[in-house]
Image: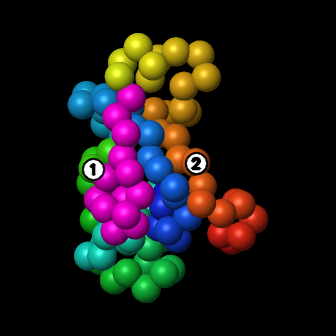
Amino acid sequence: MAALRDGAVAELLLADHPESAATAWIGPRGADLAASADELTGRGVPDPVTDRADAALARGLATTGAPLYFLPPDLASSPGAPQDGVGAPLRVPREAIA
């Protein structure tokens, strides 16, 4: 989520799991995205709210211009599939994001 929020994601790979109960915290701007409310309030977002994690990730991605790819169920559950159904190759080395 931090890499997406910071515009470092080249593309987002997302497993299609409509039954998922995973959530994320969002604010009024598309890039306001975090795993915790405290993380967003620490960045100056006054009233974060929860949203479905997949919806929050897609919303955040829309502000970056990077493409979104949905993984079909057979790929999402195969060995080597992205952890938690989310994968994101980066535009820049991870060290440059911190």
Picture disc at residue 34 = none
Residue 1 is at least partly visible in this image: yes
Q: Which residue corresponds to the image point at 44% horizontal and 47% vertical from the top-left? A: 12
Q: Helix, strand or loop at disc 1?
A: helix
Q: Which residue corresponds to the image point at 37% horizontal and 59% vertical from the top-left? A: 61
Quadrant housing residue 59: bottom left
Quadrant housing residue 18: top left
Amino acid carrying label 1: it is Ala
Amino acid carrying label 2: it is Pro
Count the labels in the image: 2
Q: Helix, strand or loop at disc 2?
A: loop
Q: Which residue corresponds to the image point at 71% horizontal and 61% vertical from the top-left? A: 93
Magenta residue span: 57-71
Q: Is residue 44 above or below residue 38?
A: below
Mark-to-mark CA distance, 2 and 1: 19 Å
Which x, y percent locates residue 60?
A: 35, 62
Crowd around label 1: few <14 · some 14–19 · many ≥20 (10 Å): few
Quadrant housing residue 66: bottom left
Q: Mark 2 — residue?
A: 89
Q: Is residue 65 left or right of residue 89?
A: left
Q: Which of marks 2 and 1 is nearer the N terminus?
A: 1
Which x, y percent locates residue 2?
A: 54, 63
Q: Is residue 35 above or below residue 42?
A: above
Which x, y percent locates residue 57?
A: 37, 53
**Does residue 36 belong to the magenta stretch?**
no
Q: Mark 1 — residue?
A: 55
